[in-house]
Amino acid sequence: MMLRYLFLLILLAGCSAQPDAALTASDRETLDRTAEAHAHDTPVPTPAATTAPVAEVIGKTISYGKVDGMAVEGYLVRPKKARGRLPGLIVIHEWWGLNDNVRDEAARLAAEGYVVLAVDLFGGKVATQPPEAMKLSQQLTANPGPADENLRAAYAWLDQVEKAPRIGTIGWCLGGRWSLRAALLLPDQVDATVIYYGTVKADDAELARLQMPILGLFASKDRVVPAPTVTAFEATMKRLGKDVDIHMYDGADHGFANPSGTMYEPRAAEDAWRLTTAFLKEHLAR
């Protein structure tokens, strides 16, 4: 296992030396832990993606804005029988990219009563092997500006085109980290944020800006987002008087609820889904 992990890191170093130059030491450490955790993973669909939506939905690929003069595309999905304005939800993919498994999970979320926009932070690229996914993740982390504009465009679409009365964010793994980043980018606009085992920090200056309630779903065995960092994040949020609800699943590992991947754990994933739908209903669908 260790030899395979070392080989993976060598591959990554060779294919992404340029983006790595812009990474901080903390970024590199997180990416290295991610590579180790996903070294044997593949983007197979999990029950999080293959469970049928509770209602019929309709979805389509749309262009929701431009970044650096180029159109950005995502997957927009809503309940088929819904009428009128619906609360909006920005869905942010894991490190494989916006694949069919994430689209299926977006449909499952939409069936709960939302107009959902699954964004694409990788510019149309989708990984099928860990080295590809890691390269895309490194490039995104080293140059986050375009992705920031991407998320602003997604929010603007749901706000101005879909006329969503309230808008939330949700993501897994890399998407969990970017779900929090979206909240920090739009602290007075995002109405609710869900973080599935995304990297978090205990930074007073950053976290003080947050105005929305946050649900965090983490795993005790997670090597990418270690439990002490989650504890520090929760403590900082509470000290700042923020509305935060953190759940740590004992015995679960990173990726326990991913739409695609081999680390799916039914007990933790099913409970996290229950908490997620209740949280979104309370803060977006009210």
Image (cartoon, helix red, strand yellow):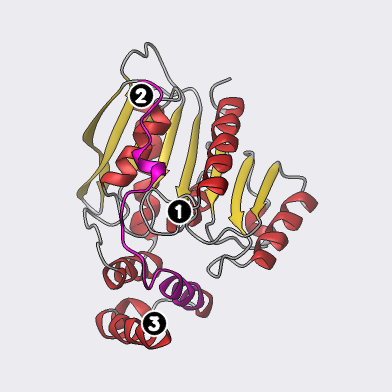
Does residue 234 appear in the picture of this structure? yes
Asked if marks 2 and 3 touch (Cβ < 8 Å), the reply is: no
Amino acid under disc 3 = Tyr
Mark-to-mark CA distance, 2 and 3: 45 Å
Q: Position of residue 192 (x, y in %)?
A: 57, 37
Between disc 3 and disc 1, the foreground one is: 1
Q: Label for residue 40?
A: none
Over which residues does the magenta segment extend? 27-55
Q: Which mark sits nearer the N-terminus, 2 or 1?
A: 2
Residue drawn at the location 54% of the way across and 49% of the way down: 195
Residue bearing the label numbered 3? 5
- Name the mark on residue 162: 2
- Image quarter of the N terminus: bottom left
Which residue is label 1 attached to?
264
**Considering only order in the chain, which callout, 3 or 2, is on the residue closer to the N terminus?**
3
Q: Residue at x 59, y 30 (%)?
A: 278
- Badge 1 marks a residue whose secondary structure is loop
